[in-house]
Amino acid sequence: MNRIKTINIVTLGCSKNQVDSEVIAAQLQKKNIKVYHESEKDCDVVIVNTCAFILDAKEQSVETILMYADRKKKGFVKKLYVMGCLVERYRDELAAAIPEVDGFYGFADLNNLFEDKTKFDLLGHAERTLSSPKHYAYLKIAEGCNRQCSYCAIPAIRGKFVSKPKELILREAQMLVDSGVKEIMLIAQDLTDYGVDLYNRKDLESLLRALAQVKGLEWIRLHYAYPLGFPYEILDVMNDYPNICRYLDIPLQHISDDILKSMKRGSTKQQTYKLIENIRKKVPGIAIRTTLISGYPIETREHHRELAQFLKDMRFERVGIFAYSQEEGTPAYPLGDPIKQAEKNRRVEELMAIQEEISAELNNAKIGSVLKVIIDEQLEDGYLGRTEFDSPEVDNEVFLYKSENEKLEIGEFYPVRITAADAFELIGKKV
């Protein structure tokens, strides 16, 4: 370890992986090692934090490992380590196929990553070295998942649901705010089960009330709420505190009773319609983001039409749609993958066309209104920002033309009048 001066951490996959990399980076920096996230220049050591959620993610992870293995063979990198979800699933196959890698590490054996037995506690540390812009950050409040959704390999990869203690979350939030963070995205595989293992009850409401009182924390955003047994009390908190965004990411995956049953989601079409109706009734103006899976093995054309009608009925503010990916070791794996990829892609495109039209209508309805916008980025001809209804990288953006005598600060909030819109972007001017 003493000979290592620079480390580049390359993170693939979801925001939960991103947080893991930031925790590891902070602990390495305590050893006087310069740590980079996604550095374009060569470093002594490269750590690739992999994803294995679906086929595309696995392929991207393997391609990235091979690229750095080639850099190592050419002498540009001294050591190459691979960690994360792909290692949990395919350690032996990877070790046999890519011998240039100096070590493959799952979540349980990260402490063996370096010779001096550096202890990497991914859930028990508050210190982070952010890879995101300094004004926003993701905050992981739990690890693993107790759900048994038929298509998902996460419980096998990440293990049982484990909540992070509330006092540690609050300490981490305060440290992030002290470092300049103004917006926090709460993440977990399942936010709504927070606290069941620590406090014998769902305790997300109490956590949100405490976080909302952290001075300097202007936006708190909720990602990945499970629909079954949804805790409506968190909506009361959303109404009580203006710094909790009227935004909810709640993956629904499908609407057909046949598909939901096979997916082992535990809910029905009627319950899902009622859930969305109740959420919108309780928090008027809320932006709901959901994700849907198209091309599940038993999905018929009628099931697809049912899903398309669901989109038209619900008019979600934000939607992500994914083609089904058959994953080894999941309950759905024995069903095979009978729907051709071209047909899956066609269904996805059809659903996205419906959503694009809805999104354009919802955005055009905002023209003339004044919204609070945080500035994320300066461009040559203006600025990019977001409203409380939009999460970084996955949702809509607000474009502001640059005024000759006006400079906006990255990470600051401004009132913006919306003057134009399209399906995925608002255009406005600072008031």
Image (cartoon, rainbow, N blue to C red):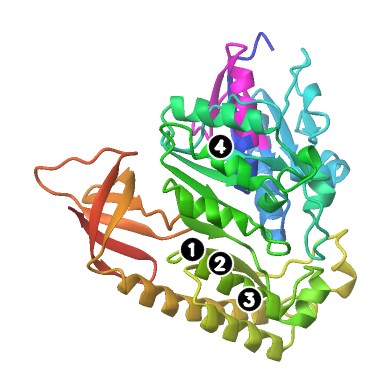
Q: Amino acid at mark 1?
A: Val
* 380 to the left or right of 406: right
- Is residue 26 one of those drawn in magenta? yes
Q: Classify 10 Å Cα crowding around label 1: few (below 14), some (14-19), many (20 and above).
A: some
Residue behind mark 3: 274
Query: Could you tell which of marks 1 and 4 lies nearer the N-terminus?
Result: 4
Secondary structure state at the residue bearing disc 3: helix
Say what amino acid the circle numbered 2 marks: Ile
Instruction: Identify residue for label 1.
Output: 283
Dot 2: what SS?
A: helix
What range is drawn magenta here? 20-48
Q: Which residue is mark 4?
A: 210
Q: If you read the primary sequence from the N terminus, does the residue marked by circle 3 or circle 2 appear first? A: 3
Residue 172 part of the magenta segment: no
Q: Who's the residue at 63% across and 14% down the image?
A: 4
Instruction: Give the numbered dot on residue 279.
Output: 2
Task: Count how many numbered circles sit on residues in the image.
Answer: 4
Marks 1/2 in contact by CB < 8 Å: the verdict is yes
Write down the quadrant of residue 198 in the picture: top right
Q: How far is mark 1 from mark 4, CA to CA?
A: 20 Å
Residue 181 falls left or right of residue 400:
right
